Amino acid sequence: MATPTIDKDAMSNLSFVLNKAGDVTFEERPKPSIPDPNSVLVAVNYTGICGSDVHYWVDGAIGSFVVQAPMVLGHESAGTVVEVGSAVKGLKPGDRVALEPGYPCRRCSFCRGGKYNLCPDIVFAATPPHHGTLTGLWAAPADFCYKLPDTVSLQEGALIEPLAVAVHVVKQAQIQPGQSVVVMGAGPVGILCAAVAKAYGATKVVSVDIVQSKLDFAKSFSSTHSYVPQRISPEENARAIRELADLPAGADAVIDASGAEPSIQASLHVVRTGGTFVQGGMGKSEITFPILAMCTKEVTVRGSFRYGAGDYELAIELVRTGRVDVKKLITGVVGFKQAEEAFQKVKAGEAIKILIAGPNETA
Ligand SMILES: NC(=O)c1ccc[n+]([C@@H]2O[C@H](COP(=O)([O-])OP(=O)(O)OC[C@H]3O[C@@H](n4cnc5c(N)ncnc54)[C@H](O)[C@@H]3O)[C@@H](O)[C@H]2O)c1
Ligand SMILES: OC[C@H](O)C(O)[C@@H](O)CO
């Protein structure tokens, strides 16, 4: 097939810029060029809104990451390759790609040890001071752009990022076929963790959330059971979850995708002796933690941060094979100029995932 000609000079590089907390503007920024022979230029087609984008928009900071200069938001994107560097193999103009938005140094002990998500010098889109992908054109290393199969749409491609987060969490949980999993939180990440756990062979997947409508969606998507925490102690909520799902010994694995202290506490009581707990949610930095339950049950406790080697590939494969139907998470798609309204809807809890079309997207 002939390579399509894409005129990058005719493209807009309109960007959605956060100036400071609550203050966003649209700005036509200088077009990036390919920085080195192994990089590509991508026209961004669709971008999802992550809770972290909303946090930066509302508070101007997440923990020690503070927006000190105007920053383009967004990091959940898919796009179309416009131009490739001279050394790039395997990608050509016109290819549709999911963008992995964090670029590690490739030289530190974490990168060399295969855990590049832990690289201290990673340049991560829309984590200050680095600009994000809510922009027209994006330059990226070619090996962090994943070609989408023909049957996977660009809109689905924008959901590969949160799905890769869930893939990483589930890998950390080391879920085996036939096991039971409790997922605290049924936002996009929790829902996707539940779906990936099911794809890994978990036969009981319990979603827990304080919002009934989120649980209704989780049940329709992949969970086998759901539970709304009551105003009782974490131990009592854990007991209720075990009774509900017929797990008298507790769950093999528990994943926190809420960041909420009470659910982290309940997690340590619902996990079985010798089970695994994975912290994926990012809430308060310090909490009261049931450390004796962890000790006496010999619970394996793991963190999970972003995604690493193989996670994007597996996320794409889960979508290609229909095991995780990410389309169902898309509440709506808005034009680029409606980005702020889309952020408002996500903040108000009116959407699971809203996609923002890129400024060059006409559909
Ligand atoms: N570890 C990582 O690399 C990584 C990556 C992306 C997101 N995150 C974090 O994962 C979490 C989930 O992300 P998301 O986009 O789904 O966010 P979200 O805010 O949409 O989902 C959180 C869910 O937790 C629920 N919740 C709140 N309190 C609860 C409680 N006491 N018990 C049970 N559920 C409760 C909320 O109702 C909500 O549905 C967030 O904390 C986010 O910051 C972590
Ligand atoms: O999906 C990736 C996450 O949103 C980011 O790690 C963010 O939460 C912190 O920079």
Image (tube, grey):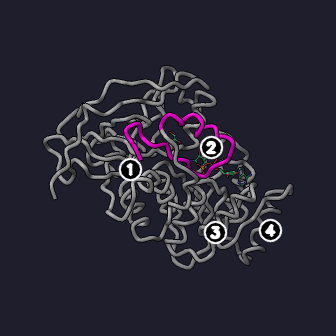
Above or below — where is 262 with respect to 238? above
| Mark 1: amino acid | Lys
Check disc 2 and report the residue beneath it: 346
Q: CA distance from mark 4 to mark 3?
A: 22 Å
- Label 3 Cα neighbours within 10 Å, binned few <14 / some 14-19 / many ≥20: few
Which mark sits nearer the N-terminus, 1 or 3? 1
Magenta residue check for 357: yes
Asked whether residue 266 appears in the rendered view, the answer is: yes
Specify whether 355 is left or right of 208: left
Q: Nearer the viewer, residue 78 or 172?
A: 78
Q: CA distance from mark 2 to mark 1?
A: 31 Å
Task: Name the residue at 72% across, 57% down.
Answer: 209
Q: CA distance from mark 4 to mark 1?
A: 37 Å
Task: Name the residue at 73% across, 62% down.
Answer: 269
Asked whether residue 268 appears in the rendered view, the answer is: no
Residue 115: assigned label: 1
Above or below — where is 7 with respect to 159? above
Check disc 4 and report the residue beneath it: 240
Task: Name the residue at 59% across, 60% down.
Answer: 191
Q: CA distance from mark 2 to mark 3?
A: 21 Å
Please provide percent x and percent y for residue 25.
51, 24
Magenta residue check for 299: no
Disc 1 Cβ-to-ligand 1 distance below 8 Å = no
**Range of magenta residues:** 336-363
Which mark sits nearer the N-terminus, 4 or 2? 4
